[in-house]
Amino acid sequence: MEGDPLDNAGALEVADPAPTMPAVNDTALRAEDAAAAVGALYQATAVGLIRLAYVILADRQAAEDVVQDAFCNLFRRWDRLSHVDGAEYYVRVAVLNACRSALRRRAVRSRRVLYELPAPSVEAAVLGGEERDELIRAVDRLPQRQRETLILSYYLDLSDGEIATLMGVRPSSVRSARHRALETLARNLKERS
Amino acid sequence: MTELENGLRKAFRAKASQIMPPPPPLELQPLPAPDPAARRGSGGFWTPLRQRWLIPMAAAVAVLAVVAAALAATSALTPRRKPRPPAAPIQINVPPYYVALDSQRPPSSYPEPVATATVRDTATGAVIARITPPSPYNSFAAVSGATDDRTFVLLAKAPPDPFTGVTPERFYLLRIDPRAPSASPRAVLTALPASDIPGGKSASELPLGDEVGPIALSPDGSMLAAILTRNEPGKLAGHRIEVLDNYLYLYDLRTDQTRIWVRKVCGSCKLASLGNQAGLGSGHPGLVNLSWTADGKSLAFISGPGVTQLRLLNLSAHSNNVQPASTPFAIKAPVSHWSQAVMTPDAKTVFLNFNYVTGYAVTAGLMRYSAATGRLATINTVPLILPDRRAAGYSNSGPLTANTILWTNYDGSKLIVADAKPGHTVGVYSGSHYTPLPWAADAIDAAW
């Protein structure tokens, strides 16, 4: 590296580690590299993914667990990843799938509304948070595919093509689901007002 | 974009903003050996995180209950003994006082534990003063000390705003006078005006949402260095992500001036080159990942993860880009990813703390690197997970993990390390000789 006198110093030979240091075998190094790569990806993306899961699940602990599990699975399957560029995509799909599973389990437990948001605070009402909560509640009452389409469209600002890839459907299905979702939302909100 | 679509966008973002960094620590288990007969979903690896966390807690509660019952029974049956005289002070050449951050909740809880500060006697562990964060702050998150053993800086944090998600933070100068009579204050806390984050005179340079990471007070106590982290939108493999972008913030306590060094991160990030994502510094705010030279003219910082380097930054350089203004130490450790690297004030020695995996076993290593000879020498290895997957009994919760380096003297001949021995411990290495120090069970960080 330019201007790095310490780096250029050929005399700086590194002695073997002391005998008490066990040898690090290839498997260990691979595991370590995988841990470092997954850890770095986690640092870069975890907050965003937890937020995404939280918007879908409305449960912070469940959102954190979903993201943790997704990264643990990624770490376990790191060697089988065809190209590392796809890791972030893989983990995002894993989070979405896990959110779907969590919602299904929740729906089985309770055959009524999927979940209720916490009661809005006084401050939230002052700042118009009540309207936002009402909107979120209306989104929660939508069918799963429509709800996901709205979140991926308006929270993550993904294109129809990207959403279609993530959800495993055609772009035309994305457009259709979003159109129906917006229509339903507008109708429901109008009725309530 | 219709009004409804705008409303959706705002509603989703408002909801998402309730989640604030840092994320909970990622707990990766060692990779299991291939076992075709193993049934998916039956192993501990798939046990939900919260349940895994509860197992040791439940065991600890059970043990505490048994011990408490035994103590109660013993005290009821036996006459009360005279209190033992205080232990003789430990004769060791380290600063006589330190400031500890004491957790008020279990360190592994999330969000971060609430901590108060105590000034303690190094040799006896006696508490000399207790400091609580001034309102509206409810916790101290980091501490660093000057070499006079009287001047410290504390980072105070308030709970995050529920709507903006911003965590107000502020630096406080702490001056201690351990020998003051009890009527006089032994610890005086003063807010640092320009370091109000956000707000203060440098608000334009410290926008809302920036989080303070590692901090380090210069040896003479005149300059404060800190790593600040900012969430920025970025792209990774064609997908939009939030990028944690770090920069170095330097605050002159005498002139109230600030200076910032940057390393632009993730201009065109690809996962294959994780080094591009690396900012400055790493680890928990309390960990000493910034280390000053004795003359206060240079500062060592970790550049990582990915291609992890310890680089020495020339603070008199004109460039505000850390890359051309710094030079790396040519450390060629057998493990390339360290959790901590601390340079001695004479800039001749670096202490490295890292974990490495061998099969199922995980070990924490502490090594000494000589910049003059390039030699690496092992000081200590601590088994964290044994080959049969059992925990080895070393403390590995909260910000202090095995072999965490807390302080070093000028030439590295004395080194204070946390959790180098089983349990929640602190001790001094003089070469390879280890002397334990008194340590509070709820201490999560400390500065000498």
Image (spheres, rainbow, N blue to C red):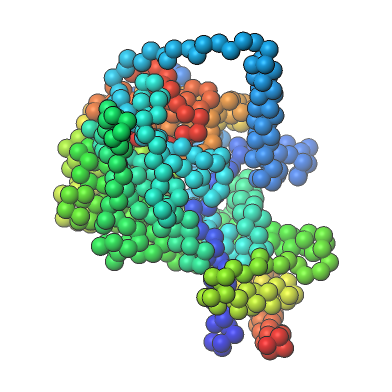
Quadrant of the image occupied by residue B265: bottom left
Measured along the vertical axis of the image, is residue B320 above or below residue B113? below
Side (left or right) of A174 relative to B402: right
Q: Position of residue B334 (x, y in %)?
A: 42, 31
Residue B312 can be seen, yes or no: no
Q: Position of residue B106 (x, y in %)?
A: 56, 39
Quadrant assignment for the C terminus of chain B:
top left
Position above or below: B152 against B6: above
Nearest the eye: A36 or B423: B423
Residue toward you, B159 or B251: B159
Q: Nearer the viewer, residue B38 or B224?
A: B224
Q: Quadrant of residue B74?
A: top right
State which quarter of the image contains the N terminus of chain B.
Answer: bottom right
Q: Residue at x 73, y 39 (%)?
A: B43
- Residue at 64 percent of width and 78 percent of height: A135
Q: Position of residue A148 (x, y in %)?
A: 66, 72
Q: Residue at x 74, y 60 (%)?
A: A101
**Nearer to us in this view, B139 or A153:** B139
Can residue B169 be seen from the camera position used here?
Answer: yes
What residue appears at the point 20 percent right and 55 percent down from the top-left corner?
B256
User: In x, y percent, where is residue B313?
Assistant: 24, 46
